[in-house]
Amino acid sequence: MVSRVIPVEPFDLVIFGGTGDLARRKILPGLFRRFCAGQMPEGSQIIGAARSDMDDAGYRKVVADAVGEFGGGRDCESGTLDAFLNTIHYVTTDAMGDGGWETLNGKMRDGHVRAFYFSVGPSLFGHLAERLHRFGLATPDSRIVVEKPFGHDLETAKALNATLAEHFDETQIYRIDHYLGKETVQNLMAVRFGNMLFEPLWNSQYVDHIQITVAETVGVGGRGGYYDKSGAMRDMVQNHLMQLLCLIAMEPPAKFDPDAVRDEKLKVIRALEPVDWHHIVRGQYAATEDEPGYRDDVENPKSRTESFVAMKCHISNWRWAGTPFYLRTGKRLKARASEIAVVFKDAPHSIFGADAGRHRNVLAIRLQPNEGMTLDVTIKEPGPGGMRLLDVPLDMSFADALGPDAEEAPDAYERLIMDVIRGNQTLFMRGDEVEAAWAWTDPLIEGWQTRNDVPKVYDAGSSGPEDALMLMHRDGRKWREIKA
Ligand code: NAP
């Protein structure tokens, strides 16, 4: 396959929190893979910044270890790591103090794209933005990359947007949601808007309902302290599931351009109806013989925070009136699997009679594992015995269809970092989108608090609480099986 990658300019990328978990697991190995793929132009440099006292050599060791542990790529030859490490520097910098900033400024070069990745806790975002200005590092076309969580509720998100806006223009702010960097998620737009086949059917006249599932097998583990203040609604629904919902439900933008796409996503969020509390199920995973339960994991025996949430939502607009969207996400479920399923309506009349059963087309977009799409199509069951019908999937696994190119496709973080360098904001959340998403989730969370809602306990390794299954059954529908 001929590569048509858009080239990038030489850049200076500063990773605040360059010694942290996210930098080591995702950002640095991802940059190395882009380097191996020839996408990091000569003359680019990466500067790690954190409080730990270290020199360049010390940080290069951190980077080499991270690459060793979390992966190189197919094109990475043995000498490449040394060449990559030559682009790496480190400056001891305190986001809340004045130490290191002059040195950091001295490393920045005129005429290069400047990107500052805030891979630190959210309480430091404002401090970093302010110091980048005060110490003269921020130029008019510098970019900042802001990690999740973006606020804890509408009020804190507004305050954070306002703080960042004091120092940076919206066109310089890249709020990252790594779900948007996933190949399949972008493919969703290609499938919807690049084909004639689907869009005419993409509405309430033909679509019975849509399911979005993001299931994890892990518990909250070492993140219990953070998670218990957050819960599945804040940690997953307000950002990742909401973004998926937007892409599946939005109107076709006039062009694939950052504001055109984000305007359409924003309209979806604003058209979401408040959710009836009977249409939400929250859960907490139970302990097993070998593994602690949610409350043990967060060391709070009275916790009412949800590790699972399922809900039925409606979008009030012409396209979707009457088509429910069912969302669910949770931890310690039976498999790690994320998918969006568009379930089409039954054919208006069955010429095969009642014995043929009920058959529906389902377009399933798998985000993980094994990214790809399947389209269930009804056919005749082979062999004699009359006209019996069967649903078979037309299966397109990207790994099978695209071969090694699919395996080497950049992962979400790699792609998004390169988009920052290119100055392309299409796959990043705009400030008003984030606020609109909080404006929708806040009342739901407040409702649980005022009603003293207690999450249902569910078995680890299951599909979630029984009530979540009932949420669908009551409507004569059922969740798709969660399977890896
Ligand atoms: P982490 O492992 O705790 O790392 C935090 C980093 O920030 C360290 O490099 C730390 O180094 C640095 N730091 C702390 N205080 C600082 C200060 N005052 N000045 C300068 N640097 C400081 O956290 P993380 O897991 O990498 O997460 C980073 C951000 O990404 C958070 O906002 C998190 O919510 C988000 N995120 C993380 C993940 C993930 O998988 N880890 C996923 C999604 C989002 P020193 O102690 O040496 O200063």
Image (cartoon, grey):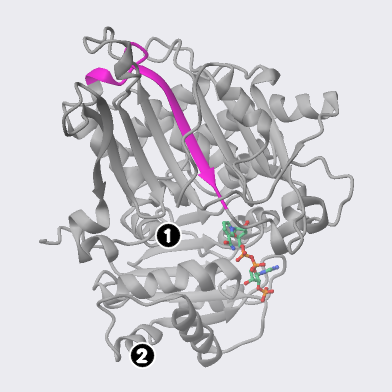
Q: Quadrant of residue 366?
A: top left
Neighbour tally class for label 1: few under 14, some 14-19, many 20 plus, Cα within 10 Å: many
Q: Quadrant of ligand 1?
A: bottom right
The reply to whether dot 2 and dot 1 touch (C-beta < 8 Å) is: no
Q: Which residue is mark 1?
A: 413
Sequence-first disc among 2 and 1: 2
Q: Amino acid at mark 2?
A: Asp
Q: Amino acid at mark 1?
A: Tyr
Q: Looking at the image, which residue is at 29% across and 40% down?
A: 374
Residue 173 in sight from this viewpoint: no
Residue 346: % across, % down: 33, 15
Check the picture and name the quadrant holding the N terminus: bottom left
Ligand 1 within 8 Å, label 1 CB: no
Q: Looking at the image, which residue is at 37% across and 25% down?
A: 343
Q: In the image shown, does 72 or 350 lie closer to the viewer?
A: 350
Residue 418: % across, % down: 34, 60
- In the rendered structure, find residue 82 and report the number of the disc placed on it: 2
Label 2: element kind: helix
Residue placed furthest toward the left: 2
Q: In the image shown, does 302 or 336 lie closer to the viewer?
A: 336
Q: Is residue 16 above or below residue 69?
A: above
Q: Is residue 121 above or below residue 90?
A: above
Magenta range? 200-216
